[in-house]
Image (cartoon, coloured by chain):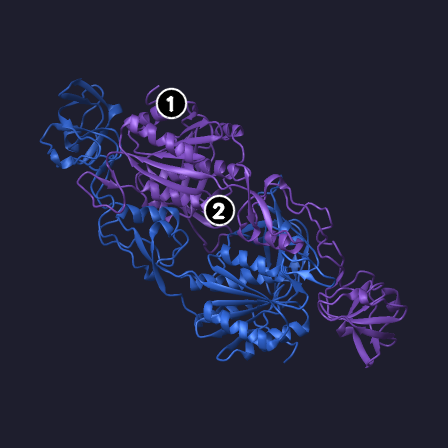
Chain colours: A purple, B blue
Amino acid sequence: MKGFFQLISSAEFYRLFSRFSALPGENIADVKGLGRVVVDNSLTADEPLPPFSRSTMDGFAVRARDTFGCSESEPALLQIIGEIAMGCPGTEFTLGPGQAVHIWTGGELPVKGDSVVMVEYTHLLDEQTVEIFRPVAPGENVIRAGEDFAKGADILPEKRMLRPQDLGVLAGIGITRLQVHKRPKVGIISTGDELVPPNQPLAPGKIRDINSTTLAALVTEAGGIARSYGIIEDNLKKMLAVCEQALAENDMLLLSGGSSVGRRDFTLQVLEGLPGSELLAHGVAVRPGKPTLLAARDNKSIFGLPGHVASAMVVFYLFVRPLLRLYSGLPATHGLSEIQVTCGEQIPSSIGREEFVRVRLEKTAGHALPVATPVYGKSGLIRPLVEADGLLVIGRDVEGLDKYDTARVLLFP
Amino acid sequence: MKGFFQLISSAEFYRLFSRFSALPGENIADVKGLGRVVVDNSLTADEPLPPFSRSTMDGFAVRARDTFGCSESEPALLQIIGEIAMGCPGTEFTLGPGQAVHIWTGGELPVKGDSVVMVEYTHLLDEQTVEIFRPVAPGENVIRAGEDFAKGADILPEKRMLRPQDLGVLAGIGITRLQVHKRPKVGIISTGDELVPPNQPLAPGKIRDINSTTLAALVTEAGGIARSYGIIEDNLKKMLAVCEQALAENDMLLLSGGSSVGRRDFTLQVLEGLPGSELLAHGVAVRPGKPTLLAARDNKSIFGLPGHVASAMVVFYLFVRPLLRLYSGLPATHGLSEIQVTCGEQIPSSIGREEFVRVRLEKTAGHALPVATPVYGKSGLIRPLVEADGLLVIGRDVEGLDKYDTARVLLFP
């Protein structure tokens, strides 16, 4: 089997994720909840939001029927029985026929009040009498109690990553602690006798470890907690020991090394040598990214990533990120924004594998869509990644795209 | 002036930002650098990346001229003078005419070696002799020293928010500490006698403070550091004292209260009452968001936000976020992804102000672009925000959009 891959499609790769499940929950303060995912979509409103019927305007709370038929020339005359100061209970007042109460935006309606006349359509005759120039319908300029969320209502859609407005709703309903899925912990292990850490001097023949830093930032960006286990020499026994420890301490391992056939075989030996682990994928029909390995042990996952950082990054966005999102309680998708673009030049591709081309995007006069230009470079280079804005997708059965074709780009976050 | 606004356009509002500047720098470890912005674009490569010419394939390092004209039927015969083990200096070998060295992906080329023949196009005759079936050009299957970044080259474009691949480059060049702009600190102050904190019981006429939680999360999402100063009662002297303290401790203040005319006047009094502050904007011609106030004191900024959380959030994305990005060293833009959509229904608008309509996006058969459907709701409601994916933009001089028109949507992050 050495050196040869059994390529599966990306769709087949995603299906492998069905054996993994979201991580268990932990209890946190909701001010820490941005980007987290609530367990079991378990949140319902214990109280209605808003808690009472509120005015959305400054003006007069009235019984709508008392304003029917009034106009500029024939105003309705209502008796003012008081003012509802902000934060005071409107229910201290009960409107009888022909009565009105001064109310401010956000104030609670009085008993029997069903609508609010904007101050612009009123005129004070004296302290006790107001003229109304326009009729209102019942409910006009009012948000009813529970109009946002009735008591007992579900608050959020399933598998929702919490956004600022979601946290706002929870605050409004008085929910200040949440049960959310744990953030996945990810161990990162670099292999290669040629690697030195970024903070150490270079000896001849050595290069600095780029992948550990890049992968740790990708994990952080995806909501995970990255921990680096450093650079492990090409020694199977030592490597297996480090992997065992890292597997015990994390939910996922990312193994990253060189691209030589020997290094790939080494990674395969590691995945096959971990007791209880099962090799799920040995190669995937995407470019770049072919030499991707995936193994599982219980609910934990181990990726063998391509050695070139550019390839490793594409594989991260396509496959690692969806699994991290699954662990976090989200759908197992990459979650990157997708946009339509116009191809700036002809882009050849190969039948039989999906291609992900690094592109730069520019707004160009005469094109409604952004224009995507490939940032080519040998796969060992990292500069094209620094220049790229995202990945242009070319389907498995497409021979390439022509200049000015419309295409799809996954934006880097 | 009470109750009346002097509306300016959003373009005029953005021009006000020219008086503000990016925050000073601080020194951090680059593993903490995700999302930060390097001061002065000061990073250049102290050493070339890669540090030496590397093979991108497993095979044999050769002098290209020794392979010219070879073929399957007439292979070139080269003498193998050794193997460059991973991480060992390739310069220990010097290729004479007709000589080759075993090399692995990522290995350093030998002296006089200028290209690599893939192992697939070779055959070992014996331990000292290899047949080459395909010629290579000089530089083929090689990344030259400095091909990514030459010594002294600028590494990153200006005003770049650091991404995983950028941090990877820095690691590769041995830069492990960075001078980045400080993260802006933002004080959040809610006003209103009707408000109670989310964790306290509701009394009649009271509602929970939604805005503080929502704004804090929006600040965090934008890379700032949020600090809440709680709910301050409607008392000018007390409010001014809290604002003074918060201004001393932060780069920006966000004042948020109700939407009544009295509350707006109160916020205006606060902004005008802070010694040394200058009122820059008193209303902006966007909907929602009209009652937005902006004041400055030195390089610090104070926003008076609309009371309704839905409006406050739109103003945050349009105006607060660009200023936070400016403080962080980025361009003063919202930085939200923009996509083209198809309108799912007719959307009316008003001439004279830009409109930002909350929309839900769906992929629909028969439409290449996502279909945007407005999520209408009274402006005091928060549920439409929970259901929305972004803001559809309707220009100032447009009366509305027809069903199936193409439009622009700013995606929530």
**Residue A254 horizontal/vertical position (percent):** 39, 35
Q: Quadrant of residue A376?
A: top left
Residue that lies at the very extreme toward the left in this rendered image? B96
Q: Using the image, determine if residue A138 lies above or below residue A71.
A: above
Q: Is residue B42 left or right of residue A274?
A: left
- Mark 2, residue position: A341
**Residue A320 horizontal/vertical position (percent):** 45, 36
Instruction: Name the kind of residue labelled 2 in the image.
Output: Val
- Which one is earlier in the sequence, the residue at label 1 or at label 2? 1
Q: Is residue A166 left or right of residue B187?
A: right
| Residue B332 at least partly seen | no
Which residue shows up at 61% across the image and 49% down it? B342
Which residue shows up at 59% across the image and 72% down it? B283
Number of marks present in the image shown: 2
Subunit of label 1: A
- Using the image, tell me which numbered label, if any, was put on residue A17: none
Which residue shows up at 35% across the image and 25% down it? A268
- Mark 1, residue position: A272
